[in-house]
């Protein structure tokens, strides 16, 4: 298999770091972005010129375009673009400040959108490529206390599904990775939290218990690295793929409930058409 050239955002920790290592270990080249590139010093020392560290805040559109161009100019091509940079925000909808809501959307939605737009001209020109969007089971379902995070991932899912149809004629693929709970620091230092309202105290406690059950058996980020290589090497990669055991169970229950309700209310839907 010939070497591939990757552009990965958010590589300082978690999925981004593990996937960067997996790509480098098998002989691929990686342009790895992080807000603080010193977090990549150990990888740069080990893998040398195979790694191109780039300092990047994905909310800066001009910087996104410059970073993608730098990576393409350096390697001569791009094969896999991974929009991994993002974070989770904890807070009930009523508790969110405007700044908190905007910051979540700026990073998780617009950051991925700008990097995607920056990469597309190169992928279209070479008539090949694969865009990996790191979504979440929270991108097709929704949970208490992470509503604005859900909103950001639902937006990512929507534009990515449309994008997949738009660029298929150019031989470019799109895949949404939808992980469940993994042993990363997504809910720890990487996350942000709103100030709780006293009236929601008991509901917060219930939400925390429900989340504890969902993440009782967290996935292994290193195992996810082996999985992502299978996705990018597939001749016909999926538009969506779960990472972890639990997401399929959650999705099936959610969609069965939706279908039941839609069918129950279909007479009203028909009436509304006139």
Image: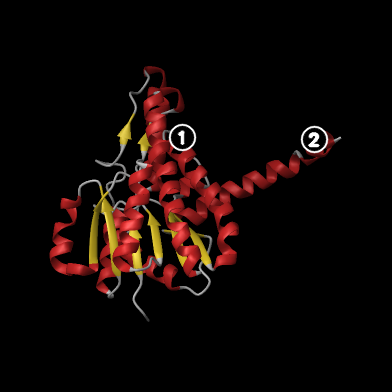
Residue 116 screen position, x and y as percent: 44, 53
Q: Secondary structure at mark 2?
A: helix
Residue tagged 1: 147
Q: Quadrant of residue 263?
A: top right
- In the picture as drawn, the residue positioned furthest to the right comes out as 274
Q: Residue sitting at 37 percent across and 19 percent down?
A: 197
Report the quarter where the N terminus lies. Answer: bottom left
- In the picture as drawn, the residue positioned furthest to the bottom comes out as 1
Q: Secondary structure at mark 1?
A: helix
Report the quarter where the C terminus lies. Answer: top right
Mark 1, residues whose alpha carbon is within 10 Å: few (<14), some, or many (≥20)? many
Residue 38 screen position, x and y as percent: 15, 51
Q: Is residue 95 left or right of residue 154?
A: left
Against 102, is 235 above or below? below
Q: Which mark is residue 268?
A: 2
For the residue pair 37 and 87, the one nearer the viewer reads as 37
Q: Is residue 217 left or right of residue 47?
A: right
Mark 2, residues whose alpha carbon is within 10 Å: few (<14), some, or many (≥20)? few
For the residue pair 35 and 239, the one nearer the viewer reads as 35
Q: Residue sitting at 54 percent across and 48 percent down?
A: 159
For the residue pair 227 and 197, the one nearer the viewer reads as 227
Q: Is residue 87 left or right of residue 129?
A: left
Against 103, is 169 above or below? below
One can see residue 133 in this view: yes
User: Does label 1 or label 2 sit earlier along the sequence?
Assistant: 1
Q: Residue sitting at 32 percent across and 63 percent down?
A: 73
Residue 16 screen position, x and y as percent: 30, 56
Residue 88 screen position, x and y as percent: 36, 40
């Amino acid at each position: 298999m010939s070497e591939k050239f990757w552009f990965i955002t958010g590589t300082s920790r978690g999925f981004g770091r593990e996937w960067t290592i997996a790509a480098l270990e098998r002989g691929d080249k990686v342009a790895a972005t992080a807000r603080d590139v010193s977090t990549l010093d150990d990888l740069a020392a080990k893998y040398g010129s195979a790694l191109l560290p780039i300092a990047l805040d994905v909310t800066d559109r001009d910087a996104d375009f410059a970073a993608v161009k730098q990576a393409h100019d350096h390697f001569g091509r791009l094969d896999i673009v991974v929009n991994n940079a993002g974070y989770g925000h904890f807070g009930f909808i009523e508790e969110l400040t405007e700044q908190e809501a905007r910051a979540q959307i700026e990073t998780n939605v617009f950051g991925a959108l700008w990097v995607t737009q920056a990469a597309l001209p190169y992928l279209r020109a070479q008539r090949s490529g694969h865009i990996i969007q790191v979504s979440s089971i929270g991108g097709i379902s929704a949970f208490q206390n992470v509503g604005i995070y859900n909103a950001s991932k639902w937006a990512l899912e929507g534009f990515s599904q449309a994008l997949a149809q738009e660029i298929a004629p150019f031989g470019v693929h799109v895949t949404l990775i939808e992980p469940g709970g993994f042993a990363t620091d997504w809910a720890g230092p990487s996350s942000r939290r709103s100030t709780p309202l006293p009236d929601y105290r008991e509901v917060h406690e219930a939400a925390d218990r429900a989340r504890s059950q969902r993440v009782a058996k967290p996935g292994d980020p290193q195992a996810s690295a082996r999985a992502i290589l299978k996705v990018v090497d597939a001749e016909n990669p999926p538009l969506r793929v779960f990472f972890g055991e639990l997401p399929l169970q959650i999705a099936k229950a959610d969609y069965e409930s939706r279908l039941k309700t839609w069918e129950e209310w279909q007479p009203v839907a028909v009436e509304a058409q006139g």
